Image (cartoon, grey):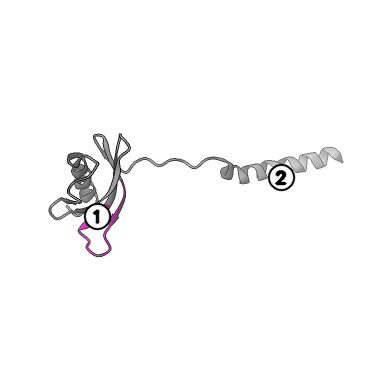
Amino acid sequence: MRRLASLLLLPLALGLLLLFSPALTPPALGAPGICVGPVCGDEIHRSAKHHWQLRLRVNDQQGQHERLVVDCRNGVLSPLAGPVERGYAAAVARRACRLAGEA
């Protein structure tokens, strides 16, 4: 009788272990969205007011980051100056516009 009980409890215990094991594992880290050189852009959203504008967060390898708005019609970044190098930030913005179908 004991052997029968242990045989029935083993699959139950394994099932509970598999059920709760995803809660014990750390969440996976996502890869950055778009990278050009040392600058990466993520959290890319289309503007609710103007479909040709994209909002994105850019960061570089030195840990500097900022949020930008890009006008995909002419590629203008706003703000024009900031802590992240504008040449690479503009390239990330152009690629995001291309991928969004706005270029």
Q: Which mark is residue 12?
A: 2
Q: Which residue is located at x 43 percent, y 40 percent?
A: 29
- The verdict on residue 46 being magenta is yes
Q: Amino acid at mark 1?
A: Leu
Which quadrant of the view contains residue 3?
top right
Where 44 falls versus 48 (above or below)?
Answer: above
Counting other residues with Cα less than 10 Å from the Cα at mark 1, is it few (<14), some (14-19), or many (20 or more)? many
Could you tell me residue 103's position as x and y percent? 16, 52
User: To which residue does mark 1 refer?
Assistant: 54
Count residues near mark 2 (Cα–Cα under 10 Å), then give few for <14, some for 14-19, many for 20+: few
Tell me which amino acid carries mark 2: Leu
Q: Tell me which numbered mark, 2 or 1, is placed earlier along the sequence.
A: 2
Where is residue 94 drawn, in percent x and y? 19, 47
What is the count of numbered marks? 2
Residues drawn in magenta: 42-55
Is 18 placed left or right of 72 in the picture? right
On the image, the x and y values in percent for residue 46 come to 27, 57
Magenta includes 43? yes
**Which label sits in the foreground, 2 or 1?**
1
- Residue visible at 26% across and 34% down? 38
Q: Is the C-beta separation of discs 2 and 1 under 8 Å?
A: no
10 above or below 97?
above
